[in-house]
Image (tube, grey):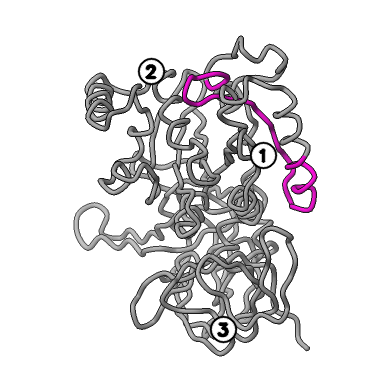
Amino acid sequence: MELLRLATAGSVDDGKSTLIGRLLYDSKSIFEDQLESVERTSVARGDEYTNLALLTDGLRAEREQGITIDVAYRYFATPRRKFIIADTPGHIQYTRNMVTGASLADLAIVLVDARNGILEQSRRHAFIASLLRIPHLVLAINKMDLVDWDQEVFERLKDEFRAWASRLDITDITFIPISALQGDNVVHRSPNMDWYEGSSLLHHLEEVYIASDRNLIDPRFPVQYVLRPMSGEWHDYRGYAGTVVGGVLKPGDEVMVLPSGFTSTVRSIDTLDGPVSEAFPPMAVSVTLNDDLDVSRGDMLCRPNNQPTMGQDIDAMVCWMSDAAMLSPRAKFTIKHTTNTARALVKDLHYRLDINTLHRDESAQALTLNEIGRVSLRTTSPLFFDEYRRNRLTGSFILIDEHTNTTVGAGMIVGETQAG
């Protein structure tokens, strides 16, 4: 079955964990012992109801404070589709966790409390979803039971968000009024909102079309590891292992190895279950070639007439994730891009972005925790990249502090730095 990766986002206490718990519960995707544990914990906490948010808030600190801190992943399936849900935190201090959890999502659900309206963090998460090029966005107006199922509240918030989001690069937005606590419009249509003519949230998740979201045009295969068994029937085998991040590869295809520029043809494509006739994203495979070429980790296989940009100067949007360091001109970091690692120098900080107004602050001298800005970087060795809007995997990278080895920034490549 087709797999849909989705992430929940929004401000704190808007009901993200409760929504996921309700999805799991109403779709009968939790075990009896899990439900019994949640019921016992709910009683011990003094809750008057079974707190389904406890299905995802697994850390002790999360249950004590009633908030989500880390990203929680949950898996479930219906007869139509399989799902991986990333429950991301709403607190501003954990925005970096939200970026991590949503980075591979096909769809993002941004929850809004119908009583409080669209808050700064709601906009922040919607903007990050746009920046991450998540193809599909659902704005779930939650807690409709607390505003007496009022259609005017839903329409007002819908119009307000649509006006703000018109400046973002979001092509598919769906608005759904729900009550995650009571289950209205989550799995089943709600009789309390007969004025709503759309589908339930789960039905939308089952039906949203994602087949065309992945790049199947530009073949990209970053080499992660060279397989060289030294004994047995595979002693002559030389395969290049990795994950296909773009396009389609087939035996007989002519490929070019970057950065050397040498060409060969694909002899075979192997998986753990045996050889396959083609490979496409996000398959993990081993590729063998008909020629003995010098290929190692960090190299990339592509088509001779369809190559990524190879360069050392890049422009990118960066989400800063560190409270111990800042991003400023002349700062140096380690950059991790696909399977390639190099050192990077910040040449320039062009502007810092105001999430609420989308205003560009060109006077900014640095990026601090949870801030987003556009920068120019120079790397010590060439990277093989596409613009992020064309390929989310070859167009993204992380920045690592050289002294602490912690990830301090996540970047999305806008393009190659232009001379002058």
Helix, strand or loop at mark 1? loop
As displayed, is residue 152 above or below residue 4?
A: above
Q: Nearer the viewer, residue 339 or 306?
A: 339
* Near-viewer residue (25 or 208): 25
- The residue indicated by pointer 1 is 212
Q: Reply above or below: 1 against 57.
A: above
Q: Is residue 130 visible?
A: yes
Q: Is residue 338 left or right of residue 173?
A: left
Badge 3: few (under 14), some or many (20 or more) residues near its Cα, within 10 Å? some
Residue flagged by tag 3: what amino acid is it?
Answer: Ser
Q: In the image, residue 419 lies at what x, y percent? A: 76, 86
In three-dimensional space, the C-alpha distance between marks 3 and 1, rounded to whole angstroms, equals 38 Å
In the picture, the disc for residue 351 is none
Q: Give the Cα distance between marks 1 and 2.
A: 30 Å
Under circle 3, the secondary element is loop
Where does label 3 land, which residue?
A: 328
Count the labels in the image.
Answer: 3
Q: Position of residue 201 (x, y in %)?
A: 58, 25
Q: Which label's residue is closer to the chain start, 1 or 2? A: 2
Mark 2 and mark 3: Cα distance apart in space: 50 Å
The percent coordinates of residue 206 (x first, y second) are: 57, 25
The amino acid beneath tag 2 is Lys
Q: Which residues are magenta?
A: 160-186
Q: Determine if residue 299 is in view.
A: no
In the drawing, does residue 309 fall left or right of residue 155? left
Q: Work out whether 74 lies above or below 297.
A: above
Residue type at mark 1 is Ser
Q: Which residue is mark 2?
A: 28
Identify the image quadrant of residue 161.
top right
Callout 2–callout 3 Cβ contact below 8 Å? no
